[in-house]
Amino acid sequence: MNDVSLRAATDADYDFVYNVQKTTMWEYVEQVWGWDEDAQQMRFRGRFDPAKNQIVVMEGTDIGVFAAEHRKDDIFLAKIYILPQYQGRGIGTRLIESLLKEASEAGKPVALRVLKVNPARRLYERLGFEAVGEDEAFFMMRYDAMRATPGQEF
């Protein structure tokens, strides 16, 4: 991971963040709700806050987006989108493990939600997240360092 880093997003990253989100999530959103490009762009425009996003950089190339919200009772993993050509290299795993270590040191659990049709759920389960709730589209998952099995805590 020495060649992978995070940098703060800026307003200039708007198109990159939207395109990464679209590239990585289109298939799953399409399966659940259908993809309406105009609606997706409008929703994104209303929610994009560069201060809440970090750009994943590998060897000087922007390859993804990461966002974690530090809340009162937990840390919420809001986004981890890695462009397809960089997936399968352990980048997402390392970013999540780093967040789990940070949460463990702070004595906080990590929460996330994942579309039921998104195979990323298997990664989260492998890292020790457990489903703690669900609705029609999402599983709500949680990693609690205090309940992690030996060797699983980061």
Image: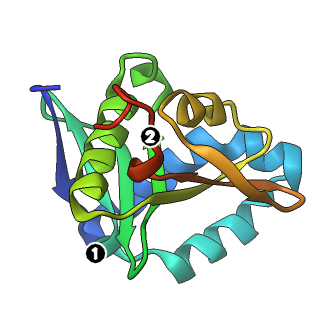
The answer to whether marks 2 and 1 mark residues whose Cβ atoms lie closer than 8 Å is no
Judge the density around disc 1: few (<14), some (14-19), many (≥20) Cα neighbours within 10 Å. few
Tell which circle, 2 or 1, labels the residue nearer the N-terminal end: 1
Instruction: Give the residue type that dot 1 points to.
Output: Ala
* Above or below, 147 relative to 41: above
Instruction: Give SS at disc 2.
Output: loop
Instruction: Give SS at disc 1.
Output: helix
* Above or below, 62 relative to 68: above
Please name the residue shown 30% across and 49% down the image: 99
Residue 63 in sight here: no
Residue 46 in sight here: yes
**x and y, in percent, of residue 118 in the image:** 71, 37
Please name the residue shown 83% across and 56% down the image: 137
Q: Which mark is residue 148?
A: 2
Residue 109 quadrant: bottom left
Of 82 and 104, nearer the camera is 104
Of 100 and 24, nearer the camera is 100
**x and y, in percent, of residue 44 in the image:** 57, 71
Q: Which residue is mark 1?
A: 51
* Above or below, 40 relative to 66: below
Relative to residue 73, is residue 113 drawn left or right?
right
Please name the residue shown 53% across and 50% down the image: 21
Residue with the most extreme left position:
2
Q: CA distance from mark 2 to mark 1?
A: 31 Å
Residue 130 quadrant: top right
Residue with the most extreme top position:
89
**x and y, in percent, of residue 89 in the image:** 37, 16
Residue 37 quadrant: bottom right
Q: Looking at the figure, which quarter contains the C terminus?
A: top left
